[in-house]
Image: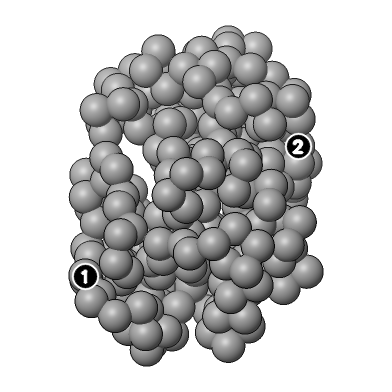
Amino acid sequence: MIPTPPLLPYRLIATDLDGTLLRSDGTVSGRTREALAAATAAGAAHIVVTGRAVPWTRHILDDLDYRGLAVCGQGAQVYHAGEHRLLTSVTMDRQLAGIAVAKLEAEVGPLALAACRDGLDGKVVLGPGYEFQGYELPVVAATDTAEIWSAPLTKVYVQHPTLGDDELTRIARETVGGLVDVVLAGAGIIELLPLGLTKATGLSLAARRLDVKAAQTISFGDMPNDTPMLAWSGHGVAMANAHAELKAVAQEITASNDHDGIALVIEKLLAG
């Protein structure tokens, strides 16, 4: 007789990518792959929830042989990896975003800008002086800031020549928080999003398609942009390498992304 696989107390496992599911070298460990496979065999679904837009998430999902739904673009996009199809997409009001940028620049001085274009193949448009550190993205270098606003966008990135990430995020929230949402998604990655859009927004849409409730979800993250996702889920887990803001609201802190933090929690759940 084939033994029945152990049951998990959660039907959905939501994981951020960078700093969470992915190790520092951009790979997923064998132990974490095995733990997620065991969770799937036990009846849970795994869903990736990332700030990355689809074009720079797709190759990671393909490498994992991931066929389910993924939430991309900070909640803006629900993507069916098995069908390579975009199910939902939320775009910014570019006029409103432009007003927010102008208002923020009036407060802190000139900003370097970038933006993520909408769609399955939407590239990141880099304005003069903007730099992504440690990421290989499908980018278009713009010689004129006006090019950033020339096509539908899902988000705008801002950088300041002297202000640190936490300080710029705080000032942006205080200055333009009534126009756009402001999130710190990674080192040097401060994003302006449509007001009300969060990872929880996209995750709730995907969960509804899977007929799973928030209380049946466990989520893992490492940065402040993961806070709404952890708050929405029945159980929220921060990685050991997580930002202090996220650790403060997490219900559990596990090991780092480089030390199989996700696997440790799943293995414990499977063991009962």
Quadrant containing the N terminus is top left
Q: Is residue 111 left or right of residue 98?
A: left
Image quadrant where residue 10 sits = top right
Q: Which mark is residue 141?
A: 1
Secondary structure at badge 1 equals strand
Q: From the viewer's perspective, is residue 230 above or below residue 197?
A: above
Q: Which residue does the image show at 48% across and 73% down from the upper left? A: 154
- Mark 2, residue position: 234
Q: Which of 231/245 is in front?
A: 245
Q: Nearer the viewer, residue 21 or 8?
A: 21
Q: Quadrant of the C terminus?
A: top right
Q: Secondary structure at mark 2?
A: loop
Looking at the image, residue 177 sits to the left or right of residue 20; the answer is right
Q: How many marks can you see? A: 2
Residue at figure coordinates x 62%, y 42% from the top left: 167
Within 10 Å of the Cα at label 2, are there few (<14), some (14-19), or many (20+) other Cα atoms?
some
